[in-house]
Image (cartoon, coloured by chain):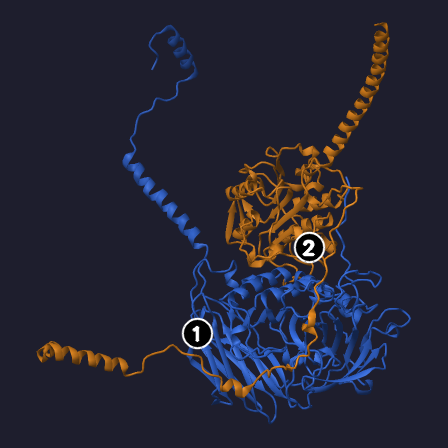
Chain colours: A orange, B blue
């Protein structure tokens, strides 16, 4: 019994040490796990894996130069921060760069004295001219495009995409004018976003609009995960920034001008968040009061990075384990087909074979019966009729 | 967090040090050539034509698909094999080629966008393939080619014969369409440059900067794909992709009025190397009008001279070979300079042998008349021309008023093919083979009536007008010099585009101007005005009448004074009747 007791105390003492050790190790491990999970949580906190941008300018005619310049400056910033052309749908309703009224062709300037050419040398416009219509815009958003539409004109987003949507043009209380001939209302836009949400076409959506009374366009949104910014409140006009005397038109709108200046300071690793974006262009600079709406957005705007929407920040996970590739695919042999000598000699065609053209067989015309045939047919019918029923019926005709 | 820069794809091909373990079969041979032709024009302007050609011995039509692309761009190769295309010709042009001032271009193109395609014989539904092809091309070139549909597509019956190798020509597999309104800008040039093997990073393509190219009188970029003979025996064919860019710089706009042109002045760049993937990279300067350097001088001087027969004329060219390091000299860069010795005017303007114009006559918004005028300036030879006219359905042509007159007398065409239009479905197609007498003017006139469109069919800017595409005139023009009927690889590219079957004439295609017609346009503000007016009338008229009939009048007590109010309040508390 004493032996057992001593053994028991020995074991319990050993166990106690062991237990303590185990407990300490487990505690450290848990702390590490939590810490790791925290960093991993920060790592994947935004929840998106790819970025898309839909940038639309809805105005036509030379005096709306500033709307094209607005859209192109956002395009430029978004490209600079990493979103590739294949993920940007750019819609410009008119061509300002190669417009005959442009004194410097192939350029669109945003600053006076032609300081900054936002058109650049590497621009891909997906929808241009008459293609920018309300129908095409809504089809791009909802993805209901005809099957022959090329990939560059589609918004191929999925449920982990963050989408930036930028609209500019002339607008009013509850509508935005497209190309001076049609309008999109805020209800239609809200319904389009709801369709996108139900089809899980976005993870989070940032909507920026730079028009007169822009805040009315986001009043009707009801889908989750949408953050909206506008350049002016209902009842206010958004004003343009500065004219250039050489080009002769206003170059930019105020809100987008200060937005561009703000975005020029952002680089792909910057930590600025949405609260800084809300402060862009206060009333003293913009004359109108910019507004924003965040009640539909689940995260706190202070934790949303600018690059979550404007840039294409990819998350990288480094792995040390080896990956086995499959067996190499062998190319099929061409076979004897390419070896046989073609006995046929090819030749070019005569570009203007006059005799051939003149004697070209005339195309088959529609067959008409010969000319006197109908007349003869009717005569036959009448003769048969009167033969059967007697000659006295003739008097009804004459 | 980490971030990655977007992947920059190296377009300069594969280095020799990379090895591939697989592929026991040899890859088909492909070859890339580039050249630039500079021709000073009589009016003081300068004409530069870039030609890039990729030849590839492969067969797109076999069952196992082509998968390894080297010099040939993959996007176009996939288009060819998916839609069974035999030939594809697409051009984007800004500006109009002034034949009377500039002569004939090496490769003509109409203003706007033009696309014509020959499909293979194996295609069963040509219209469906055409529709899908235009959509795919609109994505590749960032152009609105998806507006090409049955209302502006025609099937020519005699024009636009294939320029490549064929077995037989059945015009059911040909489709032709133009978009005269199409704008060309940097967004079309960017994907075009990306199709080149060296991109815009090396070789002649570094000169293609959009700010200078679009500030010109004429700009045209084209892509031509066709099967060609590999050699003189022509037992095997290879696919040829030609990308050409024609630009005419104006003396006063780009040249500041001085008759002195250099590469830097034209393109704001100089050349430092040839494209490493090119087998030949040359610059040709046309010095035919400058024997013994009496009018202009060329620097740096070059000993290489070559002669070529192009457009029926034997021209002499000074050649700069960019694959030789000696061309770049000690400064390692080539800036060609062409300086004129005297500022006096040039000799008389050259008269092109074939020239055409087109205009709309008439007044008002109901009827009009289209006149196409063709000039044959050859002193003694007459030659046939094939005129192709494609008029949209909203100009209703009266073909019974079609007249063709030469020198005042009636000139009956030897072949007429007319396909009438169907409203909103098909345009008019008129093809005529007309013999032009020597030294004469031939005029083709037809009257038309303008249609009233439905209000949804108007463009957002209907008062600009509606465009009618250019007429195409294809002709075999007699040449003064014997043409070379053998197309070999040694000929310069600009002279070997149109195949030559006989020595005494050369094939030329002339495009007229597009027309701009005004259709009767309704006043689009009227619905708004009508609604406002009607509502005002209803509100004011009916409303007043309703009020007069149904309003009843009552006497109202005036508001009591404050003292009275307090007295009434106290009385209410007491329960005593109130003061009146």
Q: How many marks?
A: 2
Residue A71: x %, y % from top left: 65, 51
Residue B420, numbered circle = 1
SS of the residue at dot 1? loop
Residue A263: x %, y % from top left: 72, 44
Closer to the camera in the image, A185 or B193 = B193
Q: CA distance from mark 2 to mark 1?
A: 51 Å
Q: Is the C terminus of chain A in the top left, top right, bottom left or bottom right quadrant?
A: bottom left
Report the chain holding disc 1.
Answer: B
* Above or below: residue A62 compared with residue B544: below
Closer to the camera in the image, A25 or B458 = A25
SS of the residue at dot 2? loop
Residue B515 appearing in the image: yes
Answer whether labels 2 and 1 touch (C-beta < 8 Å).
Answer: no
Q: Residue furthest bottom?
A: B380
How many other residues sit within 10 Å of disc 2, few (<14), some (14-19) or many (≥20)? some
Q: Residue furthest right?
A: B330
Label 2 or label 1, whichever lies nearer to me, is 1
How many other residues sit within 10 Å of disc 1, few (<14), some (14-19) or many (≥20)? some
Q: Is the N terminus of chain A in the top left, top right, bottom left or bottom right quadrant?
A: top right
Residue B249: x %, y % from top left: 71, 72
* Above or below: residue A229 compared with residue B353: above
* Above or below: residue B192 compared with residue B568: below
Closer to the camera in the image, B3 or B396 = B3
Report the chain holding disc 2.
Answer: A
- Which residue is identified by label 2? A244
Quarter assignment of residue B239: bottom right
Residue B448: x %, y % from top left: 44, 74
């Amino acid at each position: 019994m004493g032996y057992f007791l001593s053994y028991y105390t020995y074991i319990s003492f050993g166990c106690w040490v062991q237990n303590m050790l185990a407990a300490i190790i487990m505690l450290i491990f848990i702390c590490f796990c939590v810490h790791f999970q925290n960093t991993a949580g920060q790592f994947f906190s935004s929840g998106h894996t790819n970025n898309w941008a839909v940038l639309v300018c809805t105005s036509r005619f030379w005096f709306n130069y500033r709307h094209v310049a607005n859209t192109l400056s956002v395009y430029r910033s978004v490209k600079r921060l990493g979103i590739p052309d294949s993920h940007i749908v750019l819609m410009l309703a008119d061509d300002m760069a190669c417009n005959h009224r442009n004194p410097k062709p192939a350029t669109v300037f945003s600053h006076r004295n032609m300081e900054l050419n936002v058109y650049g040398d590497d621009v891909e416009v997906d929808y241009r001219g008459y293609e920018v219509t309300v129908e095409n815009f809504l089809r791009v958003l909802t993805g209901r495009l005809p099957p022959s539409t090329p990939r560059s004109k589609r918004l191929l987003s999925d449920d982990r995409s963050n989408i930036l949507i930028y609209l500019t043009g002339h607008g009013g209380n509850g509508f935005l004018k497209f190309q001076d001939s049609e309008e999109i209302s805020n209800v239609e836009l809200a319904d389009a976003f709801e369709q996108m949400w139900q089809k899980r076409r976005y993870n989070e959506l940032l909507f920026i609009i730079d028009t007169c009374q822009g805040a009315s366009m986001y009043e009707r949104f009801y889908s989750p995960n949408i953050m909206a910014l506008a350049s002016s409140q209902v009842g206010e006009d958004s004003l343009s920034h500065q004219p250039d005397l050489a080009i002769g038109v206003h170059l930019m709108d105020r809100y987008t001008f200060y937005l561009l200046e703000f975005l020029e300071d952002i680089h792909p690793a910057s930590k600025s968040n949405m609260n800084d974006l809300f402060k862009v262009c206060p009333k003293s600079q913009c004359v109108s009061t910019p507004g924003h709406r965040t009640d539909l957005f689940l995260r706190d705007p202070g934790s949303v990075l600018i690059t979550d929407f404007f840039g294409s920040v990819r998350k990288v996970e480094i792995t040390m384990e080896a990956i086995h590739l499959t067996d190499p695919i062998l190319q099929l042999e061409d076979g004897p087909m390419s070896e046989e000598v073609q006995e046929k000699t090819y030749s070019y065609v005569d570009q203007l074979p006059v005799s051939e053209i003149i004697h070209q067989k005339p195309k088959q015309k529609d067959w008409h019966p010969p000319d006197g045939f109908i007349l003869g047919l009717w005569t036959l019918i009448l003769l048969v009729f009167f033969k059967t029923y007697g000659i006295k019926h003739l008097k009804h005709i004459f | 967090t980490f971030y990655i820069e977007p992947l920059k794809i190296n377009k300069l091909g594969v280095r020799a040090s990379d090895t591939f373990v697989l592929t026991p079969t040899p890859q088909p041979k492909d070859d890339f050539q580039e050249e630039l032709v500079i021709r000073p024009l009589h009016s003081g302007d300068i004409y530069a034509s870039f030609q890039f050609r990729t030849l590839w011995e492969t067969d797109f039509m076999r069952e196992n698909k082509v998968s390894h692309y080297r010099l040939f761009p993959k996007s176009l190769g996939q288009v060819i094999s998916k839609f069974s295309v035999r030939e594809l010709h697409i051009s984007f042009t800004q500006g109009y080629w002034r034949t009377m001032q500039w002569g004939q271009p090496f490769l003509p193109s109409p203003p706007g966008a033009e696309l014509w395609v020959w499909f293979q014989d194996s295609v069963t539904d040509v219209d469906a393939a055409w529709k899908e092809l235009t959509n795919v091309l609109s994505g590749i070139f960032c152009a609105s080619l998806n507006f090409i549909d049955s209302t502006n597509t025609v099937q020519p019956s005699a024009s636009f014969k294939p320029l490549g190798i064929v077995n037989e020509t059945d015009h059911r597999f040909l489709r032709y369409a133009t978009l005269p309104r199409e704008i060309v800008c940097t967004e079309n040039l960017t994907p075009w440059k990306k199709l080149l093997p060296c991109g815009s990073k090396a070789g002649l393509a570094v000169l293609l900067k959009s700010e200078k190219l679009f500030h010109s009188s004429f700009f045209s970029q084209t892509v031509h794909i066709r099967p060609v003979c590999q050699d003189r025996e022509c037992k095997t064919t290879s696919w040829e992709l030609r990308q050409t860019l024609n630009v005419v710089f104006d003396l006063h706009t780009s040249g500041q009025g001085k008759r002195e042109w250099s590469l830097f002045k034209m393109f704001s760049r100089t050349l430092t190397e040839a494209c490493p993937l090119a087998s030949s990279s040359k610059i040709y300067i046309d010095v035919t009008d400058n024997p013994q350097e009496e009018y202009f001088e060329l620097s740096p001087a070059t000993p290489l001279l070559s002669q070529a027969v192009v457009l029926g004329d034997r021209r002499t060219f000074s050649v700069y070979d960019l694959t030789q390091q000696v061309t770049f000299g000690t400064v390692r860069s080539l800036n060609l300079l062409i300086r004129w010795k005297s500022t006096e005017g040039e000799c008389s303007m050259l008269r092109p042998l074939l020239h055409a114009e087109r205009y709309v006559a008439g007044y008002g918004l109901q009827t009009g008349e289209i006149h196409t005028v063709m000039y044959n300036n050859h002193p003694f030879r007459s030659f046939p021309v094939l005129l192709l006219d494609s008029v949209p359905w909203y100009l209703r042509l009266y073909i019974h008023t079609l007249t063709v007159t030469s020198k005042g007398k009636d000139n009956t065409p030897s072949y007429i093919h007319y396909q009438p239009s169907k409203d909103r479905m098909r345009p008019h197609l008129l093809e005529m083979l007309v013999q032009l007498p020597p030294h004469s003017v031939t005029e083709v006139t037809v009257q038309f009536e303008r249609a009233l469109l439905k209000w949804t069919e108007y463009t957002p800017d209907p008062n600009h007008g509606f465009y009618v595409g250019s007429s195409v005139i294809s002709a075999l023009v007699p040449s003064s010099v014997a043409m070379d009927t053998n197309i070999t690889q040694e000929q310069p590219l600009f002279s070997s585009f149109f195949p030559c079957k006989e020595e005494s004439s050369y094939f030329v295609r002339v495009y007229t101007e597009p027309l701009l017609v005004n259709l009767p346009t309704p006043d689009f503000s009227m619905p708004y005005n009508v609604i406002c007016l009607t509502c005002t009338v209803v509100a004011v008229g009916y409303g007043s009448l309703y009020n007069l009939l149904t309003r009843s009048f009552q006497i109202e007590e005036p508001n009591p004074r404050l003292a009275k109010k307090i007295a009434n309040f106290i009385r209410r508390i007491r329960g005593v009747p109130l003061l009146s």
